């Protein structure tokens, strides 16, 4: 009986000890960082046509995604607001899902479609761009990554900012 009690005590304390060690082996996941590779460009402008089209502008953001972790991650989703000259142009999402290698980066050509019905202030900014003026932009987003089959969502933050020429 005394041997069984000693054996059970040993198993119990080993279980506690091993359980306490498990969090030390769990990887700390750092969020990816984003930057612009090259220039943001206005790819196309479609003017509104009555009864046919409301019009739109397409911007291409050559976005670099850097993975600071020691393991691969999958960029599962980015829900974002595209802001032009401090005016919200569009809310959209990138859902293509790309794998970013450990300590590596991948380039994502993010095409952002902005409807011209987004407001007068934005229409003025876009008219300025068409005329050759530059303006500021920002991309605020909530990032979701897949790490070892588990989704991790990061709070909305400023991912990119710069100038459109």
Image (cartoon, rainbow, N blue to C red):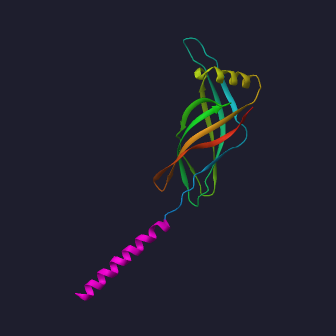
Residue 26 place in picture, x, y as percent:
49, 64
Residue 53 is drawn in which quadrant?
Answer: top right
Q: Is residue 6 left or right of residue 124?
A: left
State yes or no: residue 3 in magenta.
yes
Q: Main secondary structure of the magenta part?
A: helix
Residue 78 place in picture, x, y as percent:
54, 42
Q: Relative to 162, does residue 50 appear above or below in the rendering?
A: above
Q: Nearer the viewer, residue 112 or 88?
A: 88
State yes or no: residue 52 in magenta.
no
What residue is rendered at 63% in x and 55% in y? 104
Please identify the residue farthest to the top as the structure is shown: 50
Q: Nearer the viewer, residue 25 or 94?
A: 25
Please identify the residue farthest to the left as the structure is shown: 1
The span shown in magenta is 1-25
Q: Nearer the viewer, residue 136 or 103?
A: 136
Q: Relative to 165, does residue 5 appear above or below in the rendering?
A: below
Residue 127 place in picture, x, y as percent:
71, 21
Q: Is residue 77 left or right of residue 61?
A: left
Q: Relative to 8, does residue 27 appear above or below in the rendering?
A: above
Q: Is residue 147 left or right of residue 35?
A: left
Q: Is residue 72 left or right of residue 149?
A: right
Quarter of the image with the C terminus is top right
Quarter of the image with the N terminus is bottom left
What residue is rendered at 65% in x and 22% in y? 121
Residue 137 is drawn in which quadrant?
Answer: top right
Residue 67 is drawn in which quadrant?
Answer: bottom right
């Amino acid at each position: 009986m005394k041997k069984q009690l000693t054996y059970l005590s040993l198993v119990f304390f080993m279980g506690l000890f091993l359980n306490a060690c498990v969090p030390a082996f769990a990887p700390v996941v750092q969020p990816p960082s984003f930057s612009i590779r090259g220039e943001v460009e206005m790819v196309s402008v479609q003017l509104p046509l009555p009864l046919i089209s409301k019009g739109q502008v397409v911007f291409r953001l050559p976005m670099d995604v850097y993975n600071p972790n020691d393991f691969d991650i999958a960029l599962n989703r980015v829900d974002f607001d595209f802001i032009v000259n401090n005016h919200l142009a569009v809310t959209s999402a990138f859902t293509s899902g790309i794998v970013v290698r450990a300590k590596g980066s991948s380039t994502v050509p993010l095409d952002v479609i902005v409807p011209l019905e987004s407001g007068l202030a934005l229409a003025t900014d876009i008219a300025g761009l068409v005329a050759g003026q530059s303006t500021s932009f920002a991309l605020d987003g909530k990032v979701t990554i897949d790490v070892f089959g588990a989704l991790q969502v990061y709070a909305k933050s400023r991912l990119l900012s710069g100038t459109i020429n």
